[in-house]
Image (cartoon, helix red, strand yellow):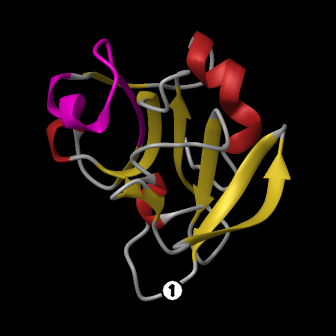
Amino acid sequence: MGGRGTFAAGKQAAYTYETVGKVDGVKIINPIDKSKSLKLPEESHSSVGYVLYDKDGVFHQYREYNSNHEIVLEIGYHHEKSLGHGDILHVHVHNTPGVEHHGQADKFVIKPGHPLYEKYKKLFKGVKQ
């Protein structure tokens, strides 16, 4: 996986992520440089989705990409100021694909019983409800 999943000057950037496993068919990736922040690639050229767990193995983030390699769905378990305090399981639905539209994405909390929670619950290791 290139630098944040992107290409620079028509060439793939240096690898910044490594695949460390799979869960429910989704690649689990980690930053190669452990001092970097926990964030998934802005684009994907090799997978339709990635999942990221923190150093304790707790779910942190899932991103799903369309055929143009742009983000269309993000599920996070971390502080989201506009939704409350502490770690919150929440979704960003990108009605207009791409990370540059993240601020306009629909954002909401999900809990057991919500269709998106039920679809992706196998990814939510360590999430407290």
Question: Where, quadrant-wise, is the C terminus in this rendering?
Answer: top right
Does 17 appear above or below 98? below
* Residue 62, x across and y down, in percent: 55, 43
Q: Is residue 93 left or right of residue 77?
A: left
Choose between 102 and 123: the one closer to the eye: 102
- Whether residue 107 is visible here, answered yes or no, is yes
Q: Quadrant of residue 108?
A: top left
**Disc 1 residue type (three-letter):** Lys
Residue at image coords 53%, 43%: 44
- Residue 39 seen anywhere in this rendered image of the structure: no
Tell me where residue 74 appears, x and y as whole percent.
Answer: 44, 34
Is residue 27 positioned above or below 53 on the image?
above
- 123 or 105, nearer to the observer: 105
Q: Which residue is mark 1?
A: 34
Does residue 99 show up magenta in the picture?
yes
**Residue pictured at 66% horizontal, 56% vertical:** 126
Q: Which residues are magenta?
A: 89-104
> Please, what secondary structure does the residue beneath circle 1 have?
loop
